[in-house]
Amino acid sequence: MIKPMKCPRSSALTAAAAVAATLVQVACGGGVGELALATFLGTGGGQFLLEPQPMPADYGIFDDALTFSRSGTQVDTTPPDLYASEYNVFVSGVNGARLGACTGASGRVVGERVTITGCFTGRYVNVNRLVSDDGTRVLYHSFDPDLATGLWVDVNDASHALKFVGQTAACEYVGATKRAASYQRRLAEVSQAANGRPFVLTTAGITSLAVTGGQTWTGEFIGISGLRLTSGTGSVDLQRRDTAAPAACP
Protein backbone atom coordinates (compact mmCIF):
# COMPACT_ATOMS: atom_id res chain seq x y z
CA MET A 1 0.00 0.00 0.00
CA ILE A 2 1.23 3.49 -0.83
CA LYS A 3 1.24 5.48 2.38
CA PRO A 4 0.32 9.17 2.51
CA MET A 5 3.38 11.37 2.43
CA LYS A 6 4.46 13.37 5.44
CA CYS A 7 4.48 17.15 5.42
CA PRO A 8 6.08 19.33 4.20
CA ARG A 9 5.33 18.54 0.56
CA SER A 10 5.62 20.82 -2.47
CA SER A 11 3.26 20.30 -5.40
CA ALA A 12 5.21 22.35 -7.95
CA LEU A 13 8.18 20.91 -9.80
CA THR A 14 9.93 24.26 -9.44
CA ALA A 15 9.14 24.34 -5.70
CA ALA A 16 8.79 28.11 -5.77
CA ALA A 17 8.77 29.41 -2.21
CA ALA A 18 5.33 31.02 -2.31
CA VAL A 19 3.66 28.02 -3.93
CA ALA A 20 5.37 25.58 -1.58
CA ALA A 21 4.38 27.55 1.49
CA THR A 22 0.73 27.64 0.41
CA LEU A 23 0.60 23.93 -0.38
CA VAL A 24 2.28 22.94 2.88
CA GLN A 25 -0.28 24.97 4.80
CA VAL A 26 -3.12 23.28 2.90
CA ALA A 27 -1.76 19.77 3.37
CA CYS A 28 -0.79 20.17 7.02
CA GLY A 29 -3.95 21.53 8.52
CA GLY A 30 -4.90 24.48 6.33
CA GLY A 31 -8.49 23.27 6.17
CA VAL A 32 -8.57 21.68 2.72
CA GLY A 33 -7.42 18.12 3.50
CA GLU A 34 -4.82 15.70 2.18
CA LEU A 35 -3.18 16.18 -1.18
CA ALA A 36 -3.90 13.59 -3.87
CA LEU A 37 -1.50 10.77 -4.74
CA ALA A 38 -0.87 9.16 -8.13
CA THR A 39 -2.90 6.00 -8.76
CA PHE A 40 -0.91 2.76 -8.99
CA LEU A 41 -1.22 0.59 -12.12
CA GLY A 42 0.89 -2.57 -12.50
CA THR A 43 2.18 -4.02 -15.75
CA GLY A 44 0.62 -7.25 -16.99
CA GLY A 45 3.11 -8.23 -19.71
CA GLY A 46 6.36 -10.16 -19.44
CA GLN A 47 8.09 -12.89 -17.46
CA PHE A 48 7.86 -12.91 -13.67
CA LEU A 49 10.51 -14.95 -11.83
CA LEU A 50 9.45 -16.78 -8.68
CA GLU A 51 11.22 -16.63 -5.34
CA PRO A 52 9.04 -18.70 -2.96
CA GLN A 53 8.87 -17.80 0.72
CA PRO A 54 10.43 -19.45 2.64
CA MET A 55 13.12 -20.41 0.12
CA PRO A 56 13.28 -24.22 -0.38
CA ALA A 57 16.67 -25.87 0.17
CA ASP A 58 16.63 -27.31 -3.38
CA TYR A 59 15.74 -24.05 -5.12
CA GLY A 60 17.74 -23.54 -8.32
CA ILE A 61 18.47 -20.52 -10.46
CA PHE A 62 15.46 -19.04 -12.29
CA ASP A 63 13.70 -22.42 -12.53
CA ASP A 64 10.17 -21.13 -11.90
CA ALA A 65 8.48 -18.29 -13.79
CA LEU A 66 5.12 -17.03 -15.02
CA THR A 67 4.69 -15.32 -18.37
CA PHE A 68 1.87 -12.78 -18.21
CA SER A 69 0.17 -11.61 -21.40
CA ARG A 70 -2.93 -9.72 -22.49
CA SER A 71 -3.81 -11.89 -25.52
CA GLY A 72 -4.98 -15.24 -24.19
CA THR A 73 -2.69 -18.05 -25.27
CA GLN A 74 -0.62 -15.77 -27.49
CA VAL A 75 2.66 -14.70 -25.89
CA ASP A 76 2.31 -10.94 -25.68
CA THR A 77 4.66 -9.06 -23.35
CA THR A 78 3.49 -5.56 -24.23
CA PRO A 79 2.20 -3.47 -21.32
CA PRO A 80 -1.51 -2.68 -20.95
CA ASP A 81 -3.29 0.51 -21.91
CA LEU A 82 -1.15 3.09 -20.11
CA TYR A 83 -4.24 5.19 -19.34
CA ALA A 84 -6.48 2.37 -18.09
CA SER A 85 -7.11 1.65 -14.41
CA GLU A 86 -7.63 -2.12 -14.86
CA TYR A 87 -7.32 -4.85 -17.50
CA ASN A 88 -7.46 -8.61 -18.10
CA VAL A 89 -4.32 -10.72 -17.77
CA PHE A 90 -3.49 -14.28 -18.88
CA VAL A 91 -0.78 -16.77 -17.93
CA SER A 92 0.42 -17.98 -21.32
CA GLY A 93 3.55 -19.85 -20.25
CA VAL A 94 4.81 -21.56 -17.12
CA ASN A 95 8.20 -22.98 -16.17
CA GLY A 96 8.81 -25.05 -13.03
CA ALA A 97 6.70 -27.55 -11.11
CA ARG A 98 5.84 -25.08 -8.35
CA LEU A 99 3.67 -23.07 -10.76
CA GLY A 100 2.24 -25.86 -12.90
CA ALA A 101 -1.35 -25.24 -11.79
CA CYS A 102 -1.18 -21.78 -13.37
CA THR A 103 -1.01 -22.98 -16.98
CA GLY A 104 -3.74 -21.31 -19.04
CA ALA A 105 -5.11 -19.34 -16.09
CA SER A 106 -6.66 -15.89 -16.50
CA GLY A 107 -7.52 -13.02 -14.23
CA ARG A 108 -7.49 -9.27 -13.80
CA VAL A 109 -5.20 -6.46 -12.70
CA VAL A 110 -6.99 -3.64 -10.86
CA GLY A 111 -4.61 -0.94 -9.74
CA GLU A 112 -2.01 -2.70 -7.59
CA ARG A 113 -4.15 -5.84 -7.13
CA VAL A 114 -3.57 -8.99 -9.23
CA THR A 115 -6.05 -11.89 -9.19
CA ILE A 116 -5.42 -14.93 -11.43
CA THR A 117 -8.02 -17.62 -10.86
CA GLY A 118 -6.57 -20.74 -9.23
CA CYS A 119 -3.04 -19.40 -9.57
CA PHE A 120 -2.15 -16.16 -7.80
CA THR A 121 -3.79 -13.48 -5.67
CA GLY A 122 -1.67 -10.61 -4.43
CA ARG A 123 -0.44 -7.11 -5.13
CA TYR A 124 2.37 -5.09 -6.61
CA VAL A 125 4.60 -3.71 -3.84
CA ASN A 126 6.44 -1.75 -6.54
CA VAL A 127 6.51 -1.76 -10.33
CA ASN A 128 8.93 -4.72 -10.42
CA ARG A 129 7.70 -6.96 -7.60
CA LEU A 130 4.54 -8.98 -6.90
CA VAL A 131 3.78 -10.59 -3.52
CA SER A 132 0.96 -13.07 -2.86
CA ASP A 133 -1.52 -12.29 -0.09
CA ASP A 134 -0.23 -15.17 2.03
CA GLY A 135 3.40 -14.14 1.49
CA THR A 136 4.46 -17.51 0.06
CA ARG A 137 5.08 -16.33 -3.50
CA VAL A 138 7.25 -13.40 -4.52
CA LEU A 139 7.58 -12.64 -8.24
CA TYR A 140 10.16 -10.33 -9.84
CA HIS A 141 9.94 -8.66 -13.25
CA SER A 142 12.80 -6.63 -14.74
CA PHE A 143 10.42 -4.24 -16.52
CA ASP A 144 11.19 -0.57 -17.19
CA PRO A 145 8.10 1.62 -17.69
CA ASP A 146 7.87 3.81 -20.77
CA LEU A 147 8.39 7.50 -20.07
CA ALA A 148 7.98 9.07 -23.52
CA THR A 149 4.26 8.26 -24.01
CA GLY A 150 1.83 10.89 -22.77
CA LEU A 151 2.26 13.92 -20.53
CA TRP A 152 3.13 13.50 -16.83
CA VAL A 153 0.82 15.88 -14.96
CA ASP A 154 0.96 16.96 -11.32
CA VAL A 155 -2.03 15.25 -9.65
CA ASN A 156 -2.61 18.32 -7.46
CA ASP A 157 -2.05 21.08 -10.00
CA ALA A 158 -2.59 20.42 -13.72
CA SER A 159 -0.64 23.56 -14.67
CA HIS A 160 2.54 21.69 -13.69
CA ALA A 161 3.65 18.90 -16.00
CA LEU A 162 6.65 17.06 -17.41
CA LYS A 163 7.29 15.70 -20.91
CA PHE A 164 10.05 13.15 -21.55
CA VAL A 165 11.72 13.24 -24.96
CA GLY A 166 14.06 10.42 -25.95
CA GLN A 167 16.36 8.70 -23.45
CA THR A 168 17.86 11.68 -21.62
CA ALA A 169 15.86 14.87 -22.31
CA ALA A 170 12.69 16.30 -20.77
CA CYS A 171 10.74 19.53 -20.56
CA GLU A 172 9.07 21.04 -17.51
CA TYR A 173 5.89 23.13 -17.85
CA VAL A 174 4.76 25.48 -15.10
CA GLY A 175 1.80 27.45 -16.37
CA ALA A 176 2.98 29.29 -19.48
CA THR A 177 6.65 28.78 -18.58
CA LYS A 178 8.68 25.93 -20.06
CA ARG A 179 12.18 24.83 -19.15
CA ALA A 180 14.49 22.14 -20.47
CA ALA A 181 15.56 19.27 -18.25
CA SER A 182 17.83 16.24 -18.45
CA TYR A 183 17.41 12.88 -16.76
CA GLN A 184 19.12 9.56 -16.12
CA ARG A 185 17.22 6.29 -15.80
CA ARG A 186 17.78 3.57 -13.22
CA LEU A 187 17.00 0.35 -15.08
CA ALA A 188 15.38 -2.66 -13.44
CA GLU A 189 17.52 -5.76 -13.03
CA VAL A 190 16.98 -9.15 -11.39
CA SER A 191 19.95 -11.34 -10.50
CA GLN A 192 20.83 -14.21 -8.19
CA ALA A 193 23.80 -15.44 -6.22
CA ALA A 194 25.53 -18.57 -7.53
CA ASN A 195 23.58 -20.87 -5.19
CA GLY A 196 20.23 -19.53 -6.37
CA ARG A 197 19.67 -17.19 -3.45
CA PRO A 198 19.09 -14.48 -2.59
CA PHE A 199 17.37 -12.60 -5.40
CA VAL A 200 18.72 -9.09 -5.92
CA LEU A 201 16.33 -6.58 -7.44
CA THR A 202 17.17 -3.14 -8.79
CA THR A 203 13.87 -1.27 -9.06
CA ALA A 204 13.18 0.93 -12.10
CA GLY A 205 13.35 4.65 -11.42
CA ILE A 206 15.09 7.93 -12.17
CA THR A 207 18.49 8.55 -10.58
CA SER A 208 18.55 12.21 -11.54
CA LEU A 209 16.19 14.73 -13.15
CA ALA A 210 17.80 18.17 -13.42
CA VAL A 211 15.68 21.15 -14.47
CA THR A 212 17.61 24.02 -16.05
CA GLY A 213 17.56 26.83 -13.53
CA GLY A 214 15.59 24.66 -11.10
CA GLN A 215 15.95 21.69 -8.82
CA THR A 216 17.41 18.22 -9.21
CA TRP A 217 15.06 15.34 -8.40
CA THR A 218 15.11 11.58 -8.01
CA GLY A 219 12.13 9.51 -9.13
CA GLU A 220 10.28 6.32 -8.22
CA PHE A 221 7.59 4.74 -10.38
CA ILE A 222 4.15 4.31 -8.85
CA GLY A 223 3.20 1.55 -11.24
CA ILE A 224 3.65 2.10 -14.97
CA SER A 225 1.81 5.43 -15.17
CA GLY A 226 2.62 7.17 -11.91
CA LEU A 227 5.86 8.89 -10.96
CA ARG A 228 6.91 10.33 -7.59
CA LEU A 229 9.71 12.90 -7.75
CA THR A 230 11.60 13.83 -4.57
CA SER A 231 14.04 16.62 -3.80
CA GLY A 232 15.12 17.11 -0.20
CA THR A 233 11.96 17.05 1.92
CA GLY A 234 9.68 18.00 -0.99
CA SER A 235 7.98 15.62 -3.40
CA VAL A 236 5.43 15.70 -6.19
CA ASP A 237 3.23 12.97 -7.71
CA LEU A 238 2.79 12.90 -11.49
CA GLN A 239 0.22 10.85 -13.39
CA ARG A 240 0.55 9.92 -17.07
CA ARG A 241 -2.19 11.62 -19.12
CA ASP A 242 -3.25 11.11 -22.72
CA THR A 243 -2.58 14.79 -23.40
CA ALA A 244 -0.23 16.56 -25.78
CA ALA A 245 2.50 18.76 -24.35
CA PRO A 246 1.43 22.43 -24.31
CA ALA A 247 4.52 23.48 -26.29
CA ALA A 248 7.73 22.03 -27.68
CA CYS A 249 10.71 21.93 -25.35
CA PRO A 250 13.10 24.90 -25.51
Image: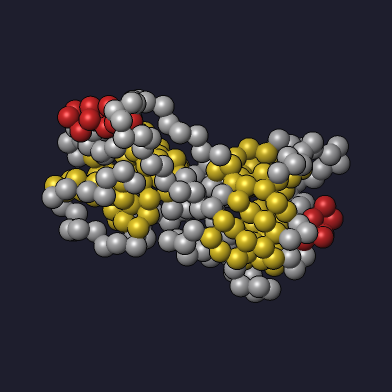
The residue drawn where x is 75% and y is 68% is 104
Q: For residue 75, which quarter of the picture? A: bottom right
Depth check, front residue: 33 or 97: 33
160 above or below 78? above
Depth check, front residue: 118 or 212: 118
Depth check, front residue: 174 or 113: 113
| Residue 211, x across and y down, in percent | 24, 40
Query: Is there any visible trace of residue 94 in the rendered image?
Result: no
35 above or below 168? above
| Residue 189, x across and y down, in percent | 56, 45
55 displayed left or right of 176: right
Q: For residue 241, which quarter of the picture? A: bottom left
163 displayed left or right of 136: left
The residue drawn where x is 86% and y is 37% is 57
83 displayed left or right of 176: right
Colour theme: secondary structure
The residue drawn where x is 36% and y is 34% is 33
Depth check, front residue: 148 or 186: 148
| Residue 13, x across and y down, in percent | 26, 39
The residue drawn where x is 45% and y is 33% is 4
42 displayed left or right of 163: right
Q: Residue furthest front?
A: 31
| Residue 239, x across and y down, in percent | 38, 50
Quadrant where the image shows the N terminus = top right
Q: For residue 16, which quarter of the picture? A: top left
